[in-house]
């Protein structure tokens, strides 16, 4: 059974991300952000509790269903991950993070500008001091820094390496600055003994091997590294494919189905929706709403209310449509899967009680939030069913016009 609810919590809407989790400059973002912030958790616990749990519906009484047996879905692409995709990703990653270094077997003497791999031991009065030793360090000799430039060394650290041969040991006399952070070494003269392992050169992509995979990808082999990238790309493709299918299914159902929403329920829900926004973003102070909307979104209160109404109307219409399909198909809550998903959700957010989740999804009404979470789980089952029976096509891509070549 797929784990659904963790993904659902990312939006305050039902199963569709486009309603309240769309653009970040969308004023409907306020409710989405509320799910993930401690401030909202506190706000929800302090705001007036709406009485939404009193509402219970037979969805089919309010919905005239259209034909949903084979919902048309047109994907913008196939979302198939090919070997070429994996290779291109790795090449791009390798190029953007280069240079990586390997031993240059053609060089034996360190010259100005060389990158070298060394071991070193720092000694004070002939005794190795803590933190002064390291192995397999890749160093820019001329820059007196690590090869990646992220770490710089005290003056003179690498000056004795010029002219040294691979495989030899070299002592470098160094004096720590008086203001050195390690007061035990501040102002002290020490000796660093270097073992020159190799002179390095930039690695070519074609040279990546199992050792590279272990060091830079944390995998045992190049094959395992490729597998990890493929899995990641496939997961990403599945996410965007599902999102596109969700959008098409929603658009189709809203077009072919007719919904008469109960006016009192929608009005109470809209007020609760609005209260969450005010208490989350304006400390529950209605007088701050106009300034907050203007400063953060460039909207008037009237414009924001219009957006809230439209977003919520779409969400609730989908709730009723999917609920009516569930009634018609005889699909009910899979209690075991629901409880498993809910446990995953709590773990994901580090919560110990479902109350916070239910209150958040219930706009402060814990009982309604629990009802809504269960309804959402059923709705996700319906969407899975509709995806399986959808008539899926892939949009044709326009081919690049052939380039004409002038001939004499």
Image (tube, helix red, strand yellow):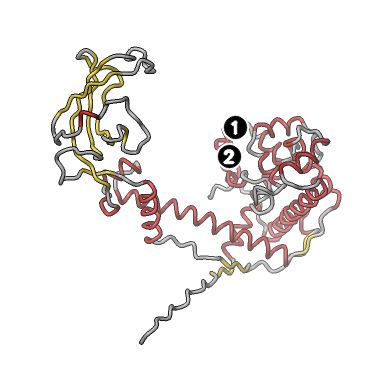
* Foreground residue among 89 and 77: 89
In the structure shown, which secondary structural element does the residue marked by tag 1 occupy? loop
Q: Which mark is residue 171?
A: none
Residue 100 picture quarter: top left
Vertical comparison of 215 with 326: above or below: above
Task: Indicate left or right for 341 with 254 as reference.
Answer: left
Name the residue nearer the viewer: 308 or 177. 177
Q: Position of residue 79 (x, y in %)?
A: 49, 62
Which residue matches tag 1?
Answer: 351
Q: Is residue 151 left or right of residue 365?
A: left
The answer to whether residue 81 is above or below residue 221 is below
Q: CA distance from mark 1 to mark 2?
A: 8 Å
- Quick one: label 2, few (<14), some, or many (20+) residues within 10 Å? many
Q: Nearer the viewer, residue 160 or 74?
A: 160
Badge 1: how crowded within 10 Å, few (<14), some, or many (20+)?
few
Mark before the other along the chain sequence, 1 or 2: 2
Q: State the count of labels.
A: 2
Considering the numbered disc 2 on the image, is that residue within a helix, a strand or a loop?
helix
Drawn side of residue 78 relative to residue 221, left or right: right
In which quadrant is the C terminus drawn? bottom left
Residue at far bottom of view: 408
Picture coordinates of residue 370, whole percent (x, y): 70, 40
Q: Which mark is drawn over residue 345?
A: 2
Q: Which residue is drawn at the image coordinates 38% and 16% (left, top)?
A: 179
Q: Position of residue 339 (x, y in %)?
A: 60, 41
Please report contact status of discs 1 and 2: CB closer than 8 Å, yes or no: yes
Up/down of 183 relative to 194, above or below: above
Q: Residue 349: image x %, image y %?
A: 58, 36
Q: Residue at x 34, y 49 (%)?
A: 225
């Amino acid at each position: 059974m797929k784990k659904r609810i963790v993904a659902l919590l990312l939006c305050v809407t039902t199963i569709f991300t486009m309603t309240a989790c769309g653009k970040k400059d969308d004023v409907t973002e306020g409710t989405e952000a509320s799910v993930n912030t401690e401030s909202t958790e506190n706000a929800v616990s302090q705001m007036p509790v709406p009485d939404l749990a009193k509402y219970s519906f037979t969805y089919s009484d309010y919905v005239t269903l259209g034909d949903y047996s084979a919902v048309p879905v047109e994907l913008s692409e196939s979302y198939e991950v090919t070997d070429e995709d994996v290779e291109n990703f790795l090449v791009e990653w390798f190029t953007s993070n280069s240079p990586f270094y390997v031993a240059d077997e053609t060089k034996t003497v360190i010259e100005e500008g060389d990158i070298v791999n060394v071991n070193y031991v720092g000694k004070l009065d002939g005794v190795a001091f803590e933190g002064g030793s390291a192995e397999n360090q890749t160093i820019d000799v001329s820059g007196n820094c690590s090869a990646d430039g992220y770490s710089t060394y005290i003056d003179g650290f690498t000056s004795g390496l010029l002219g040294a041969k691979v495989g030899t040991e070299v002592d470098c006399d160094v004096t720590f600055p008086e203001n050195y952070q390690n007061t035990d070494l501040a102002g002290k003269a020490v000796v660093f003994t270097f073992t020159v392992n190799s002179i390095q050169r930039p690695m070519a992509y074609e040279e990546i091997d199992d050792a590279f995979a272990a060091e830079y990808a944390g995998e045992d082999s190049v094959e395992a590294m490729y597998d990890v990238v493929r899995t990641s790309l496939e997961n990403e493709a599945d996410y965007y494919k599902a999102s596109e299918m969700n959008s098409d299914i929603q658009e189709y159902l809203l077009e072919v189905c007719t919904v008469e929403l109960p006016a009192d329920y929608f009005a109470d829900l809209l007020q609760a929706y609005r209260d969450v926004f005010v208490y989350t973003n304006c400390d529950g102070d209605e007088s701050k709403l106009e300034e907050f909307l203007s400063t953060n979104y460039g909207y008037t209160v009237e414009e924001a209310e219009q957006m809230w109404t439209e977003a919520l109307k779409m969400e609730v219409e989908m709730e009723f449509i999917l609920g009516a399909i569930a009634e018609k198909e005889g699909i009910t809550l899979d209690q075991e899967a629901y409880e498993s998903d809910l446990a995953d959700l709590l773990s994901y957010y580090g919560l110990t009680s479902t109350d916070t989740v239910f209150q958040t999804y219930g706009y402060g009404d814990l009982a309604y939030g629990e009802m809504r979470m269960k309804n959402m789980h059923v709705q996700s089952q319906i969407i899975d069913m509709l995806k399986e029976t959808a008539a899926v096509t892939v949009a044709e891509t326009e081919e690049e016009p052939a380039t004409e070549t002038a001939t004499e």
